[in-house]
Image: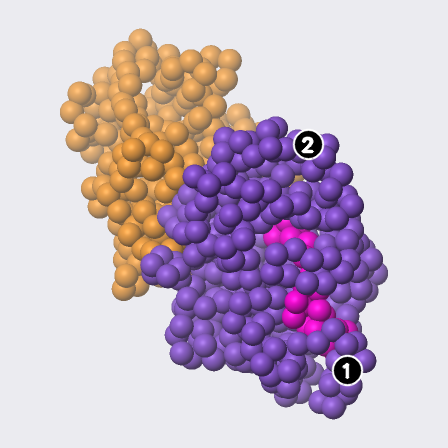
Amino acid sequence: MIIYSKCSDYATDICPCILAENGHCIECSQCRGENFCDCSDTASFCVMQELRNNGGKAKEPRRAHLCEVSYVKDYEDMFRLIRLRVPRDQVRDYSAIGSYVLVRMRDDPYFDVPVSVLHQAYDSDTIGLLIQYRGIKTNDFRTLRRGDMVHVRGPFFNGVQGRKAVASLRNSRALILCRGIGFLPSLSVMDSLRANGNSLDVYLDRGQFSGHVLDLYSGLFEIGIRETRISDETGALTEETRRIIEDSMQNGTALIHLGLSDYLIGQLIRHLEEKQYAGAVSFINNARICCGEGICGACTRDIRPGRMVHLCKEQLNRSEYHRIYG
Amino acid sequence: MNMSRIVIAGGGWAGASAAVCARKAGAETILIEKTDLLLGAGNAGGIFRNNGRFTAAEEMTALGAGDLFSIMDKCARHTNMSFPGHAHASLYDVGEIEPAVRQFLLALGVELMMESHVMDVEMKNGRVRAVILDDGSRVEGDAFVECTGSSGPMGNCLRYGNGCSMCIQRCPTYGPRVSLTARCGIRDLTAVRPDGTPGVFSGACKIARASLSEEIRKQLDTEGVVILKVPPDDVDYGKLNRKACRQYALKEYSENVILLDTGSAKLMTSYYPLEKLRRIPGLENAEYTDPYSAGRGNSIRFLAIAPCLDSMQVESIENLFCGGEKGAPLIGHTEAVVTGAVAGHNAARFAAGKEPLVLPDSLSVGLIISHAHEVFVKQGRTGERFTFSGSTFFEMMKEKGLYTTDRAGISARVEQTGLSGIFSMRIL
């Protein structure tokens, strides 16, 4: 059972983690040194009880393991699709909404790259990742061959904000707005929404991207996409985008998912606030991820005095979206 | 015009009572309960009409809020019985009471939202506008009543007790108690034990009848009570300071094991190690049914009491009212029915634009609210808890001549206040 909570690692195999052991638990007020339990989770798992049962120590953290590359395909000298064979029976763990892994070819963990899990194949114990060549870490993957071994640490689960809203929507209607590569981390959202009987209106702005890989995945996942332009040259939302949102609000869309850059996510969140959209909103997490465990601080943002979030593992309240992105 | 809507969070005795009074006042009434059962800890309760609770029940009946007491009377297995420190008690059957209350609420037109967990509140202009459920949905209302109790969640039972004892509240299954007043930014008050530790243990547990000796079962059936000597080396007077129920913090309850027949066998102690319990003749095969781990602990309560006025309105939020342990440090379901009724009725009065009702001190049901708020909230004496059925408040009732079992006298007393039938009056 996956419990969707403030901390995306809550009640997973690694909970309580090193944050709880050291008084910085995202979830548990008492593990943060407060006097009273202020838990608001819906079920089952008391972090403090688990911590005490574990002798006051964190559970074993995620460790990198070596995985064999079973498939490689290049797209436009910009991307490389790889499939990795993960330890037997663990593939299901990678299927959660917003799953991502840290992957590298070298032994040096400084080279870890956060990559969304595109798909999982239960029969072959493989997961699919798309690497975009961007810098020193990702360029390593240009030399990757089938049969090579890469270091994989994961799964991590916070690749999408609004996981609970996505997971709990049933037999309803959702609008998906994606631009460029933002389409791919949104696949797990679309998959979950469809599995729960929701109908999707998917709009894709290919951006600067010729987009063969988008065609591949929209075909593979059987997602009917409609092409659009989300923003104009100045970065403002196009009239068409505004109309799409207006129509969606009128036809009872219960969730809007944004697979966009942080800039456009901000634009859309502001627009939805102006329009007083009362439904749920989810979006892909583009934060700079480094350790993935809430330790290094690379992904932290201040929301207000006394409230700092670790975007590598923390889910925001809907009311907090605009404080970071708006 | 739309009907005014009262939303009640928490379906224990207080929430049920608030729902009855809000509905009778003419409001659309929604009762939200996180588990699959109404009455909360009342499913492990059963004792009523003992000592001053008789007076309180009759006063409430005269005030027009006797419905739930009538149901308790109909579900009673024993009436007019005595056990140490307590006279003319009744015991309701815990197996019959919940369905009976549920049917009554439904027949009255209360909308029940079972297995729905309130997680947060939405405020606007200093008032509560809606409560937010765990699925993200909102329930809007004109006025709100919080009856979420003061026990748990698991972290508190762990820190201030002996861990989750798997009690009737079932936090692991249905989620933790969420304090709505705390979500509104109001700091909860906490009761303390004599040593300053926050919270106190719930005072009783249930033993499966089938696990008792035949002789004990027969005695429970006929007399309603069984008193068994505790082996001298197991007597622990210290535990009386740790339990919630002041009226049972008597030495008889340390020197004896006292069992009451509530359909189940109610053991009048917070917890008792099973190995030791089984050394007592007749209990050799005893097994707990609530909490399942009553050999080790019980729920920790009185950890979240909101500062309320005597109208049960939360200080500084004019459309939020509290009933039960949330609204005052009162012990027991008779007390919860009283505060719940005031909270539910006043929520409806707020929706109707009327001044809130404050029960007068000439009635025990008014005095207990004002006295508890005076001592606990204003004077900050957080070691105190109150009940009609014993300890300091029962003594106060006797001193003031309020304690009586004379129904006609109680009715006349209520008549004098001019409030007869007030809780049954339609105001919306």
- Give me the disc on residue A94: none
Q: Which residue is mark 1?
A: B409
What's the residue at 73%, 49% (across, down)? Answer: B224
Q: Is residue A275 visible?
A: no
Closer to the eye: label 1 or 2 = 2
Q: Position of residue A248 (x, y in %)?
A: 60, 55
Secondary structure, mark 2, is loop
What's the residue at 45%, 68% (across, down)? Answer: B384
What's the residue at 61%, 69% (across, down)? Answer: B388
Q: Amino acid at mark 2?
A: Ser
Q: Which chain is disc 2 placed on? A: B
What's the residue at 49%, 77% (across, down)? Answer: B373
**Local crowd size for mark 1, using a 10 Å CA cut-off: few (<14), some (14–19), many (≥20):** some
Which chain is orange in the picture?
A
Front one among B393 and A58 = B393
Q: Position of residue A50 (x, y in %)?
A: 38, 36
Magenta stretch contains residue A264: no
Residue at the top extreme, as displayed: A147
Q: Which residue is mark 2?
A: B213
Q: Is residue A142 above or below residue B303?
A: above
Q: Which chain is disc 1 placed on? A: B
Relative to B199, B214 lies left or right: right
Query: What's drawn in magenta, residue-wise?
Result: B39-64
Q: Do the residues marked 1 and 2 share a common chain?
A: yes
Label 1 vs 2, first from the N-terminus: 2
Q: Amino acid at mark 1?
A: Gly
Q: Is residue A110 above or below residue B120?
A: above
Q: Quadrant of residue B303?
A: bottom left
